């Protein structure tokens, strides 16, 4: 295993980036860019489909917890050859399964050194680091011509997502965001039903995620006393803390930020909305052409704090008329007791059986699993998250509609195979950055409304909040630390 010292040997980090810039491989992006159960899709049975053909040489950054699941899924397609493993803490217990599974694959703690040493061997990169560090790994890989698979959300700030969308166009690489339902039954059903006019003239969506989250632990988070950074603790010998922080603001090490605990903090995570929105209303966002909202309002917050996400949130996203489609309001509910209003004739909520297990805790599905209700012209639909299909409610209307519903095609490839086949030019990424970027930006705008406890008006043309200067500053994100600012020029 590489030590931290020999990882840092060779070309200095700053010189590595500068040399690429000097060579003309990367150009700065102009600043103004920043300015029922009714005929569900059939699901193939049996083991995952195997593919033949040349494999993609894949580097993996973030190899524990969710990263372990992603690596196994990508490798399990038979389309990936794992050529590099990278994690800021190679000594952590959660990294050991992957290290043991691929004992002869080169290992790195710093992704910059990985590209420096093995760049010519790497064709694609899978990124499963914490939300706030998706951006630097992803944009550096793209600038070097590597295809990228990155977990949701794509970035941590509106600006980062704007830069990643621009990089996808510029470098012409396959770029896939990891909301896996975008390659399963939910995706193909929503697409077929909107094209056939079954889902039309939607004016209202209720979306909800009411399972307990890490920040709901009041013993850890005393909202009356919480006033900023956690106290400093000794950095573990196996951890590269500077690389873990990446482009984030400087923080003192504390174990309370590690192993998923970062999700609780505005500086590092995106809350329940950023974690689950891309699994719940992603297809509605794409096929109803929602784009960016013209207004986001924090309707209700419980336990509001400037540092940690609220105990409960109700957020309203208001989208204007789009072509021939009417204005639409999407209302988001999170918090264990902040349950959404649901139709009296809704029946049982839809629960997806393919939700990946969380790294800690459980997702509550017995009471109210994560899901949505969509109110269209003449029809109302209920749905769950990830791959789960929509159902027309009430059941009597679903039965009346059954003979008029279009056939829904079976997915030709799961999300992981779709990405790897896109690397070879055989398919196109279904959750490309052009598709996923505006979705993540809309969710990020909701996080800003949570953080400020505000009603924010947004100009979709200039991409600016028109009534709050602090909110505009948050669109840009925090200024990167020294030696990390160059990633915003790639």
Image (cartoon, rainbow, N blue to C red):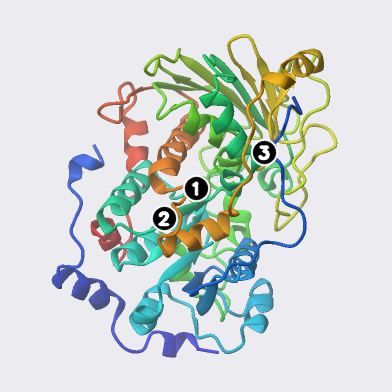
391 to the left or right of 258: right
109 lies above or below 383: below
Q: Quadrant of the C terminus?
A: bottom left
Query: Residue tagged by mark 1?
Result: 153
**Quarter of the image where one finds residue 377:** top right
Badge 3 crowding class, 10 Å Cα cut-off, few under 14, some 14 to 19, many 20 or more, is many
219 lies above or below 346: below
- Earlier sequence position, callout 1 versus callout 3: 1
Give the structural element (helix, strand or loop) at label 2. Answer: strand
2 vs 1, front mark: 2
1 vs 3, front mark: 3
Query: Residue tagged by mark 3?
Result: 385
Compare residues 214 and 48 and report the one nearer the observer.
Answer: 48
Give the structural element (helix, strand or loop) at label 1. Answer: loop
- Earlier sequence position, callout 3 versus callout 2: 2
Badge 2 crowding class, 10 Å Cα cut-off, few under 14, some 14 to 19, many 20 or more, is many
121 to the left or right of 345: left
Q: Quadrant of the N terminus?
A: bottom right
| Residue visible at 19% across and 56% down in the picture | 28
How far apart, in angstroms, are the residues tagged by discs 2 and 1? 13 Å
| Residue visible at 40% across and 63% down in the picture | 147
- Residue 33 shows in the view: yes
């Amino acid at each position: 295993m590489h030590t931290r010292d020999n990882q840092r040997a060779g070309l200095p980090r700053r010189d590595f980036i500068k040399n690429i810039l000097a060579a003309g491989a990367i150009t700065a992006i102009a600043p103004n860019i920043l300015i029922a159960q009714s005929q569900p899709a059939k699901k193939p049975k049996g083991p995952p489909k195997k593919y033949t053909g040349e494999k993609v040489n894949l580097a993996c950054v973030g190899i524990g917890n969710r990263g372990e699941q992603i690596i196994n899924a990508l490798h399990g397609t038979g389309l990936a050859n794992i050529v590099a493993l990278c994690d800021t803490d190679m000594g952590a217990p959660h990294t050991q399964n992957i290290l043991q599974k691929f004992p002869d694959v080169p290992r790195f703690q710093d992704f910059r050194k990985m590209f420096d040493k093995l760049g010519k061997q790497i064709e694609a990169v899978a990124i499963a680091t914490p939300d706030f560090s998706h951006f630097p790994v992803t944009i550096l890989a793209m600038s070097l011509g590597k295809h990228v698979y990155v977990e949701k959300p794509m970035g941590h700030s509106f600006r980062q997502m704007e830069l990643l969308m621009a990089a996808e166009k510029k470098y012409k690489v396959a770029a896939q965001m990891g909301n896996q339902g975008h390659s399963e039954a939910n995706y193909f059903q929503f697409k077929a039903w909107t094209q056939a006019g079954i889902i039309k003239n939607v004016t209202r969506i209720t979306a909800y995620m009411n399972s307990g989250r890490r920040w709901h632990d009041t013993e850890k988070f005393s909202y009356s006393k919480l006033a900023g950074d956690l106290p400093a603790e000794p950095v573990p010998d196996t951890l590269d803390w500077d690389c873990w922080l990446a482009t984030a603001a400087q923080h003192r090490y504390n174990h309370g930020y590690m192993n998923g605990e970062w999700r609780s903090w505005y500086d590092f995570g995106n809350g329940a909305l950023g974690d689950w929105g891309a699994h719940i209303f992603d297809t509605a966002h794409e096929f109803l052409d929602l784009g960016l909202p013209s207004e986001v309002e924090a309707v209700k917050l419980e336990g509001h704090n400037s540092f940690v996400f609220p105990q409960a949130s109700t957020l309203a996203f208001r989208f204007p008329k789009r072509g021939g489609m009417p204005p639409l309001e999407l209302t988001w509910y999170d918090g264990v007791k902040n349950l959404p209003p649901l139709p009296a004739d809704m029946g049982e909520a839809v629960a997806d059986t393919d939700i990946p297990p969380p790294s800690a805790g459980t997702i509550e599905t017995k009471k109210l699993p994560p899901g949505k209700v969509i109110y269209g012209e003449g029809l109302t639909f209920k749905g769950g998250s990830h791959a789960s299909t929509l159902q027309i409610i009430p059941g009597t209307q679903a039965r009346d509609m059954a003979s008029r519903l279009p056939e829904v095609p079976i997915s030709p490839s799961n999300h992981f195979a779709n990405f790897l086949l896109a690397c070879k030019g055989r398919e196109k990424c279904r959750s490309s950055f052009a598709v996923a970027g505006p979705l993540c930006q809309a969710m990020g705008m909701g996080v800003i409304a949570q953080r400020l406890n505000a009603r924010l008006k947004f100009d979709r043309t200039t991409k600016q909040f028109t009534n709050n200067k602090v909110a505009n500053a948050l669109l840009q994100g925090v200024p990167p630390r020294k030696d990390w600012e160059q990633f915003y020029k790639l």
